[in-house]
Amino acid sequence: MRQPLLCLALLLTGACTTIPDAQPAAPEPVDLLVRNVTVIDPEQATRTPGRDVLIDNGRITAVIPSESAAHGAESVVDGTGKYLIPGLMDMHTHSSIRPVHISTLKLMAANGVTGIREMGSDCIERGKIGMCIDEMRESRAKIESGELVGPRILELSSLKIDSNRPEDADDVWKLYRPTDAEQAQQTVALLAAERRPDILKIGDEFQPEAFKALLAAAREQGTKTGGHLPPMFSMAEAAAMGMTSIEHARDLPLDCSSHGAVFRGQVMAKIMGEDVPWPDRKAIPGKARDGFDEELCAAQIAALVEHGTYYVPTHLTREMDYRAGESSYREDARRAYIPAMQQGQWNPDLDRTAEAPPEMVRDLADFFRLGLKTTGMAHDAGVKIMAGTDANDTMVFPGFSLHDELRHLVAAGLTPMETLQAATSVPAEYLGRTADFGGVSEGKIADLLLLSADPTADIANTTRIEAVIFGGQLRDRAALDALLADVREWVSLADEQMKGAN
């Protein structure tokens, strides 16, 4: 009681004043606030309306109800009626083609691709059309610093490795062309010491013992392996040997048929010196369709699940196989973003199928559909599917085509949410970076897409991009359109220069 009495005495002398209650300091404003948006978080498989997403220093700092206490921000985006998803990842790209490197990165950024796995990111000779891995690392650093526009280059592969060694191969070529087990072990060791790729890219022209030894050596030192299958091994066998990821929807449809064992056995017999012919690769689509066997398929898929092998089906590449003769397909308006030089490489590839007999085209169409069916079966059984495009392969338009591949995954039987996971949370898990990517939650790097329509209702709505947030930096629709205009202008200039040179 002493203090109130003392204050009363002091009040009589005018020496005591009323002290107001202490007020909490206002929180520092964040860099960016997306207000009143529906948050779609593939990592948690949730869709939550009425959320405020606070972003500061490149990361999400909070995801809270919109009616929460007021919070300040340097920039505010009204998300009313809109949808926020993680940035999309393309897990099989080829952006390391020197003439189209910058345009490829811009097209990806403009289409909401915020991360890529580059499958073929090194060179034999510096200065040629294929960029070297140190150059790709330079681009990676420039993108991270904001000096260059593009997606994060999340994983860089080696040059393709197989046993197809020319007789005059120099020491560098020999590094990538091991022909026996000892050479394969040396390849793994030397690449780890000298080139340091994140993943070894596997080709399909391997000697059996070299392939097995390379996978064993890579597994022992903790290096990922991914790419194609040598034709004498099934997907189940490669998974059991420790292959980290298998690309393209051509091996699973084959191994899901009775023809798979016949084809692979014939290849192995030929390689081992038996007097048998090479099997006819062109017959695979029709024979795989005719010999499809659900029990065989289940056994192959079970091996992928058991060994944790990721699958990147790139259905777009099989679509090109059968649609190459369709004028509506070949005359895609997105060719405006592809220079004539590159289209000149695409056209002969298209012509090969366009000139094929009708029955072969029907087989290829059925093989594409079998690829979708087996992808759906694999997903339902627990195989981890990742979205990838083979960007810059024939009729695969960087950035744009990832949205086409997402539609193929839905056609394969994945739900729209599961399809979003294939381009967000599953890649984040594969990369070991779930703390940074794959969802919309506190602590994640703020790589996000703001959409004008709900992609869980229709996966085609991933193309309805209002803005891309990359590392907390906002690119609105005008900025994205400007990137597309830059590429179109560059293509026009490059084409004019090529005409002049001719």
Image: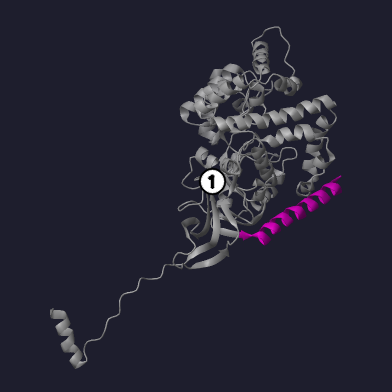
**Vertical comparison of 397 with 66: above or below:** above
- Residue 410 screen position, x and y as percent: 64, 39
On the picture, is 344 further left or further right than 158? right
Quarter assignment of residue 39: bottom right
Asked whether residue 95 is in view, the answer is no
Frontmost residue, 86 versus 480:
86
Frontmost residue, 324 versus 460:
460
Frontmost residue, 497 versus 241:
241
Which amino acid, by three-letter code, is at mark 1? Pro
- Residue 499 screen position, x and y as percent: 85, 47
**Vertical comparison of 79 with 455: above or below:** below
Does 493 lie within the magenta span? yes
**Vertical comparison of 323 with 484: above or below:** above
Does 334 lie within the magenta span? no
Quadrant position of the C terminus in the picture: top right
- Residue 288 screen position, x and y as percent: 70, 21
Check disc 1: other Cα within 10 Å, few if <14, some if 14-19, many if 20+: many
Pointer 1 residue: 42
Frontmost residue, 373 versus 133:
373
**Stretch of the chain drawn in magenta:** 475-502
- Residue 406 screen position, x and y as percent: 65, 42
